[in-house]
């Protein structure tokens, strides 16, 4: 099971092909282990205190608790209660570093906005035909407002994640690879199709 800091989850039967931390679109996930479970549990304790102090609503806390209970049940089954209790006792939450989504690259004020737009759109144009043939929609590839202007839409299309110095790598039905200037490889996932590594929790 992989878990985000806001308690979103997904599971896979092929964990060996993924790093400890995985970013799906704009959310970072970490493979659940006793130490990360202990950190998440500490955040639930803080949320309960905030609820008692009136800083968050009871409904919000109940939603978090339901999500955490699913994670806790999975962790107990996977690691055993003694290992989880030991992690809770020994973890220093002040020094633990949770998963963090890769931040957007800083803006480049020296480059005209139109040149940035053309660079990014050109990269998507180059793979558009192949992507559409594999089942991607143009809405998933491009983000335009009612006037056709380039920009981030509520749909968070591929162009929203690309920067001028990024490159597009492998294109498949399930995902499109984004290669950052430092060589880091990310994937923009097509969440409208089945992903073989996701088992949805109900």
Image (tube, rainbow, N blue to C red):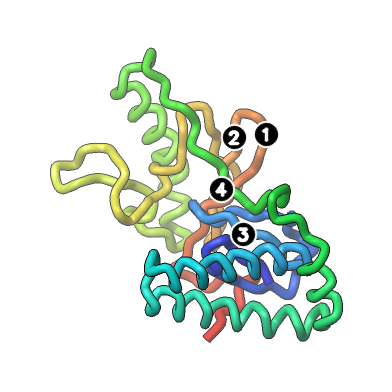
Q: Along the polypeptide, which appears first: circle 1 or circle 4? A: 4
**Residue ID for mark 4:** 101
The residue pinned by badge 3 equals 29
Question: Can you say whether 21 is above or below 65 in the image?
Answer: above
Structural distance between the alpha carbons of marks 1 and 2: 5 Å
Real-space Cα separation, disc 4 to disc 2, in angstroms: 14 Å
Do callouts 1 and 2 mark residues in contact (Cβ within 8 Å)?
Answer: yes
Left or right of 61 on screen, residue 114: left
Quadrant assignment for the N terminus: bottom right
Q: Is residue 88 above or below residue 62?
A: above
> Which residue occupies the foreground of this view, 199 or 172?
199
Which of the numbered marks, if any, corresponds to residue 183?
1
Q: Quadrant of residue 71?
A: bottom right
Q: Residue at x 54, y 78 (%)?
A: 67
Tag 3, which secondary structure? strand
- Closest to the observer: 113 or 196? 113
- Distance between the alpha carbons at the discs numbered 1 and 4: 17 Å
Q: Position of residue 108 (x, y in %)?
A: 42, 20
Q: Which mark is residue 180?
A: 2
Q: Which residue lies at the image location 56% right of the left edge and 82% below the top edge?
A: 201
């Amino acid at each position: 099971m992989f878990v985000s800091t806001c308690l979103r989850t997904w599971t896979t039967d092929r964990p060996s092909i993924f790093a400890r931390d995985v970013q799906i679109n704009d959310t970072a996930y970490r493979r659940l282990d006793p130490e990360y479970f202990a950190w998440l549990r500490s955040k639930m304790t803080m949320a309960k205190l905030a609820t008692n102090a009136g800083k968050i609503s009871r409904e919000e806390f109940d939603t978090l608790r339901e999500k955490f209970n699913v994670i806790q049940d999975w962790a107990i089954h996977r690691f055993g209660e003694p290992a989880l209790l030991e992690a809770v006792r020994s973890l220093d939450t002040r020094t633990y570093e949770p998963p963090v989504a890769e931040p957007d690259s800083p803006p480049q004020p020296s480059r005209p906005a139109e040149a940035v737009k053309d660079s990014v759109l050109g990269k998507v144009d180059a793979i558009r035909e192949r992507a559409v043939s594999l089942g991607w929609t143009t809405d998933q590839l491009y983000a335009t407002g009612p006037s056709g202007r380039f920009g981030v839409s509520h749909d968070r299309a591929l162009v929203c994640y690309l920067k001028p110095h990024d490159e597009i790598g492998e294109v498949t039905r399930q995902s499109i690879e984004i290669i950052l200037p430092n060589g880091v490889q990310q994937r923009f996932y097509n969440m409208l199709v089945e992903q073989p590594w996701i088992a949805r929790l109900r």
